[in-house]
């Protein structure tokens, strides 16, 4: 196993450490919670452990479906090893059902199913509030090549189809979610995490929210929602 070295940086939800293998990073998930670009802060007890487990399950499952990603292995309750990617400064948002910012921005009632999947790009910048951008901005700012954007979009749509089916079998609606990508030796690779922090999960029958919206909107029972997602992922469908 690789050896943990100095901390590379600390983000809102994770600490990232170097290892003695230049291609591998050591990730430690935290219980810290933020919303609205860091304006709201708090703690969700056990979130680090839950998100580490949930993200590990999703990434392993996607790999089984032929979708390569940065995940290497889960090494403790709150830690995992990942491939070291150079993060592309573009966040990809996938929307299957109107909710959150899209519902507010376009005046669509939250919960309205969309006739086709919507893919949005945002410039990854907390200071600027992750503003929405398009292919032209990405090219003008030299954030990614046209070929990389096409590959990112293709991978994103595949992830959406696999996750929707996987979650539907567990009575969960995949409302929307955020993905990040990086370059690993020049190859586009799905990175970051997939968890209730980065996805909107609703119960298929009741539309109960099982994600970070419970923290954003002060709905309570946040830890219970995260635990419910892990329970459904680990129970036999």
Image (cartoon, helix red, strand yellow):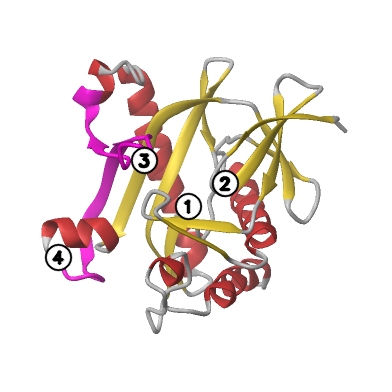
Q: Looking at the image, is mark 4 or mark 2 earlier in the sequence?
A: 2
Mark whose residue sits in front, 2 or 3: 3
Q: CA distance from mark 3 to mark 4?
A: 21 Å
> Which residue, as the protein is rendered here, is positioned at the far left?
107
* Residue 214 to residue 101: above or below: below
Disc 1 residue crowd, few under 14, some 14–19, many 20+, Cα 10 Å:
some
Q: Secondary structure at mark 4?
A: loop
Q: Nearer the viewer, residue 28 or 182?
A: 28
The residue labelled by disc 2 is: 62
Label 2 – label 3 distance at C-alpha: 17 Å
Q: Name the side, left or right, on which 37 lies relative to 229.
A: left
Above or below, 145 relative to 232:
above
Asked if the residue under mark 3 is in contact with the one under mark 2, i.e. CB atoms within 8 Å, the reply is no
**Residue 115, visible in the rendered structure:** no
Q: Alpha carbon of mark 4 to alpha carbon of mark 1: how far? A: 26 Å
Which is more foreground, mark 1 or mark 3? 3
Residue 92 disc label: 3
* Mark 1 and mark 2 residues within 8 Å of each other at the beta carbon: yes
Residue 138: percent from the left, percent from the top? 28, 24
> Which region shows up in magenta?
108-137
Which residue in the structure is indicated by mark 1? 162
Q: Position of residue 25 (x, y in %)?
A: 70, 31
Q: Is residue 76 magenta?
A: no
Task: Report the mark closest to the observer, 4 or 2.
Answer: 4
Quarter holding the C terminus is bottom right
Q: Is residue 119 magenta?
A: yes
Provide the residue designation for mark 4.
108
């Amino acid at each position: 196993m690789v050896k943990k070295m100095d901390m590379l940086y600390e983000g809102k939800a994770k600490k990232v450490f170097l290892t003695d293998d230049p291609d591998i990073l050591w990730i430690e998930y935290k219980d810290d919670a933020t919303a609205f670009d860091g304006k709201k802060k708090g703690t969700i007890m056990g979130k680090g452990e839950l998100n580490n487990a949930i993200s590990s399950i999703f990434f392993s499952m996607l790999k089984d479906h032929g979708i390569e990603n940065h995940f290497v292995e889960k090494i403790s309750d709150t830690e995992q090893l990942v491939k070291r990617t150079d993060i592309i400064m573009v966040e990809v948002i996938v929307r299957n059902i109107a909710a959150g910012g899209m519902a507010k921005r376009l005046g669509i009632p939250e919960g309205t199913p969309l006739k086709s999947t919507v893919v949005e790009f945002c410039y990854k910048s907390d200071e600027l509030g992750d503003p929405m951008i398009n292919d032209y901005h990405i090219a003008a700012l030299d954030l990614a090549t046209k070929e990389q954007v096409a590959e990112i979009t293709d991978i994103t749509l595949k992830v959406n189809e696999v996750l929707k089916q996987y979650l539907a079998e567990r009575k969960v609606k995949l409302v929307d979610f955020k993905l990040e990508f990086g370059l690993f030796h020049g190859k586009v690779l799905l990175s970051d995490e997939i968890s209730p922090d980065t996805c909107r999960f609703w119960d298929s029958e009741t539309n109960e929210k099982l994600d970070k919206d419970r923290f954003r909107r002060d709905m309570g029972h946040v830890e219970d929602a995260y635990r419910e997602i892990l329970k459904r992922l680990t129970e036999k469908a």
